[in-house]
């Protein structure tokens, strides 16, 4: 009997909590400060039984970003067009099941090492480490079960600029990498319609780290359309040529006079089929790392993308030295989501990062993290329209 009463009380308390949290989506404290409340809903379960949640962040301007603690994946990202209409511009799946089945890293956090490590091997302090060869002969994006496929601990932080803090501890030896790595990623939806991503990591043994986010964008908001008419500008006067397995040759090549010159704005499609260019051939289009002209570790603009029909503009700012510009050349109709089958070149990525294969390329800026050091990088995706 007592248990029954307790049950009823508990249910009423939960119901009350649900009602109150739904009502209070945003609260005005005074005439200048608005607290935007983060909504949390269940996003289903992994085969392991672990539960995933979905967090909805809104700002007062109207931008909405949904993030799941499964892989830190951004599942939805609405941004304004020239008429002030907000539409989702991020490719993704319809449910957790979709992401579990097959996703080419849509919207996900990538680690420990974003991009490729040649032959899945590297040597650190005289010891060789072996990683999964999950991309032909190479290691890609952290391995078979990278940070995009794990459950992160999430802490929502309401505010005028709502934040989602995600933490994950990668155990020593996970996916072949040395050292226990404690990772923290904070997504902040800012009032100027930008999403800031702050990455932090510490280790108990020397290791290598290269974290990024793998959002795919189509600024038309229509995922059945190719991205070839988007106009791209990259503040990068060099890029890293690759071999046929997309591993950098080690050379930093000037973009001037090549289809890789985006120092002035060019349509993605203008030179993407220039098959006489060996690099275009290897990437099946653009799938390369551009080196920021400004090599400082300050937050600087590295890319601007403009989509003429919607008027949407996306600017990418980063503290990182480089950006992988990938034009969805491996999208081939699978997976499906958001009403479409994602086809060839219907999305593009701007993955801010250190250079690919740095652990094997001593001339590249180091990606080694030692105990007592803190890995810290920031990237901002800022939206506007004209
Ligand atoms: C890589 C591509 C790869 C894609 C999805 C990008 O970061 O550069 O080659 O196909 O991720 O895996």
Image: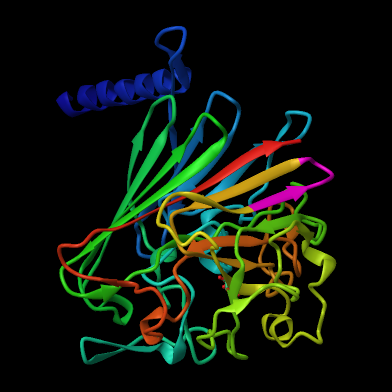
Q: Quadrant of residue 372?
A: bottom left
Residue at 72% from the left image edge and 36% from the top image edge = 385
Within the displayed image, which quadrant is ligand 1 positioned in? Answer: bottom right
The residue drawn where x is 78% and y is 60% is: 266
Q: Hey, which quadrant is residue 243 in on the image?
A: bottom right
85 part of magenta stretch = no
Q: Quadrant of residue 373?
A: bottom left
| Residue placed most toward the observer, 95 or 226 | 226
59 w.r.t. 205: above or below: above
Residue 227 seen anywhere in this rendered image of the structure: no
Place of residue 26 in the rendered image (x, y in percent of width and height, measured from the top left): 47, 19
Q: Which corner quadrant holds the N terminus?
A: top left
Spot the residue most to the top: 31
> What residue sits 17% from the left and 73% below the top?
205
Q: Position of residue 178 (x, y in %)?
A: 23, 78
Whether residue 116 appears in this view of the structure is yes
**Lateral position of residue 104 relative to residue 169, left or right:** right
Instruction: Out of 241 and 345, give the one closest to the viewer.
Output: 241
The region drawn magenta spans 304-311
Q: In this rendering, is residue 73 above or below 239?
A: above
Q: Is residue 225 above or below residue 344?
A: above
Quadrant of the rendering where the C terminus is positioned: top right
Q: Where does residue 287 sit, x and y in percent of width and height?
A: 64, 74
How many marks can you see? 0
């Amino acid at each position: 009997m007592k248990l029954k009463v307790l049950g009823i009380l508990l249910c009423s308390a939960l119901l009350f909590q649900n009602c109150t949290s739904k009502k209070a989506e945003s609260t005005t404290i005074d005439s200048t400060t608005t607290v935007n409340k983060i909504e949390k809903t269940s996003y289903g379960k992994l085969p392991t039984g672990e539960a995933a949640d979905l967090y909805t962040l809104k700002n007062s301007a109207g931008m909405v970003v949904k993030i799941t603690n499964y892989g830190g994946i951004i599942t939805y990202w609405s941004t304004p067009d020239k008429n002030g209409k907000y539409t989702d511009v991020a490719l993704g799946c319809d449910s957790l099941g979709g992401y579990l089945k097959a996703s080419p890293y849509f919207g996900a956090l990538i680690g420990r090492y974003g991009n490729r490590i040649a032959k899945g091997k590297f040597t650190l302090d005289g010891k060789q480490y072996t990683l999964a060869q999950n991309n032909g002969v190479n290691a890609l994006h952290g391995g078979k079960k990278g940070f995009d496929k794990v459950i992160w601990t999430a802490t929502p932080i309401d505010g005028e600029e709502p934040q989602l803090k995600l933490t994950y501890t990668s155990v020593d030896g996970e996916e072949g990498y040395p050292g226990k790595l404690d990772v923290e990623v904070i997504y902040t939806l800012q009032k100027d319609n930008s999403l800031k991503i702050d990455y932090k990591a510490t280790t108990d043994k020397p290791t290598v780290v290269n974290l990024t986010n793998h959002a795919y964008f189509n600024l038309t908001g229509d995922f059945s359309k190719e991205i070839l008419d988007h106009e791209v500008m990259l503040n990068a006067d060099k890029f890293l040529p690759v071999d046929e397995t997309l591993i950098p040759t080690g050379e930093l090549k000037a973009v001037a006079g090549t289809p890789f010159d985006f120092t002035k704005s060019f349509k993605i499609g203008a030179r993407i089929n220039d098959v006489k260019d060996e690099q275009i051939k290897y990437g099946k289009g653009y799938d390369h790392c551009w080196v920021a002209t400004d090599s400082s570790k300050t937050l600087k603009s590295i890319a601007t993308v403009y989509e003429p029909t919607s008027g949407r503009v996306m600017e990418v700012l980063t503290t990182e030295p480089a950006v992988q510009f990938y034009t969805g050349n491996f999208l081939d109709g699978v997976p499906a989501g958001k009403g479409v089958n994602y086809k060839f070149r219907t999305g593009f990525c701007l993955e801010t990062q250190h250079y690919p294969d740095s652990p094997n390329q001593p001339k590249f800026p180091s990606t080694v993290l030692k105990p007592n050091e803190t890995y810290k990088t920031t990237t901002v995706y800022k939206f506007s329209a004209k």
